[in-house]
Image (spheres, rainbow, N blue to C red):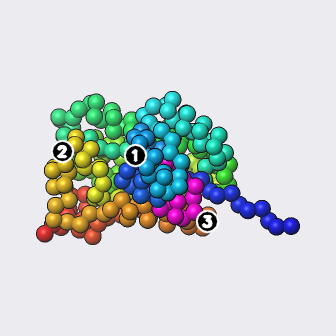
Amino acid sequence: MNAPTPATPVAVVTGASSGIGAATARALATAGYQVVLGARRIDKLTEVAEECGGTALALDVTDQGSVDVFAASVTEAFGRCDLLVNNAGGAVGTESVAEASVDDWQWMYDTNVLGTLRVTKALLPMLVASGDGQVMTIGSIAAREPYRGGAGYNAAKHGIAAMTRVLRLELLGQPVRVCEIDPGMANTEFSTVRFRGDTEAAENVYAGMEPLTAEDIADAIAWVATRPSRVNIDQMLIMPRDQAAAQQIHRV
């Protein structure tokens, strides 16, 4: 009698319509995962899903109802989740604490911290049931080092880091690995959103230096995902060669 063929592992990637999320969906598909892509921009999300043979599902991580429907759809369609990549997030504005917009801070906290909480909580039972689950959270250098012009984002990403580390402690003894991946400067839509659509200001962030690409981070995610189940990569800081700290950058 032939042994049963193992089911293809399922990876869920949030914020997968562009940037690191889209690159991660492609990389995980290449690594052998059935990928479920979640994001608000369903048109772009569908394009990425078609490229990698994945499944596009609408997802707004700031809306508990949307998360519930998303998780139910994953359960109905696949009945399993082996890997969750919490990538949805972002920054808005560069104001100081004294000049902070509470609305902007609320959005950053709700998207980065509570959004990660909502999705992780919803999928955690399936991750545990898989027998070899993984939760990866995409943080930032801002999760490790506060910097001027990043007050609200610093606070949100520090929150994500704390949540990821306590999740690691809480899941000790359970068959789920937990990893935090913190990129430095990466040339994606991140800065365009932070500068509220001002593409010139966004491009100036990377002037005279070579930033990371979305594919650089996706490659690291795929590497972490494919380590033996005994190996937990707790944290990974990925920086461009031209960046030694949050605001220590070599430019030519």
Pointer 2: what residue?
Answer: 198
Q: Secondary structure at mark 3?
A: loop
Q: Which residues are magenta?
A: 27-37
Residue 97: where, in percent of width, then height?
A: 21, 38
Q: Is residue 178 visible?
A: no
Is 11 left or right of 215, judged from the image as shown? Answer: right
Residue at the image point whose x is 48% and y is 44% from the top: 38
Alpha carbon separation for disc pair 2 and 1: 21 Å
Instruction: Identify the residue at image location x=29%, y=49%.
Output: 190
Residue type at tag 3 = Arg
Give the image location of residue 59, x and y in percent: 47, 38
- Snapshot quadrant of residue 114: top left
Marks 2 and 3: which is nearer the front? Answer: 2
The amino acid sitting under disc 2 is: Asp
Residue 209 place in picture, x, y as percent: 20, 66
Q: Give the mark, 2 or 3, whose residue is nearer the N terminus.
A: 2
Of all residues shown, which one is farthest toward the left?
A: 252
Q: Which residue in the protein does label 1 denote?
A: 44
Q: Quadrant of residue 1?
A: bottom right
* Left or right of 56 in this view: 209: left
Q: Nearer the viewer, mark 2 or mark 1?
A: 1
Q: Quadrant of residue 207?
A: bottom left
Label whose residue precedes the other's in the sequence (3 or 1): 1
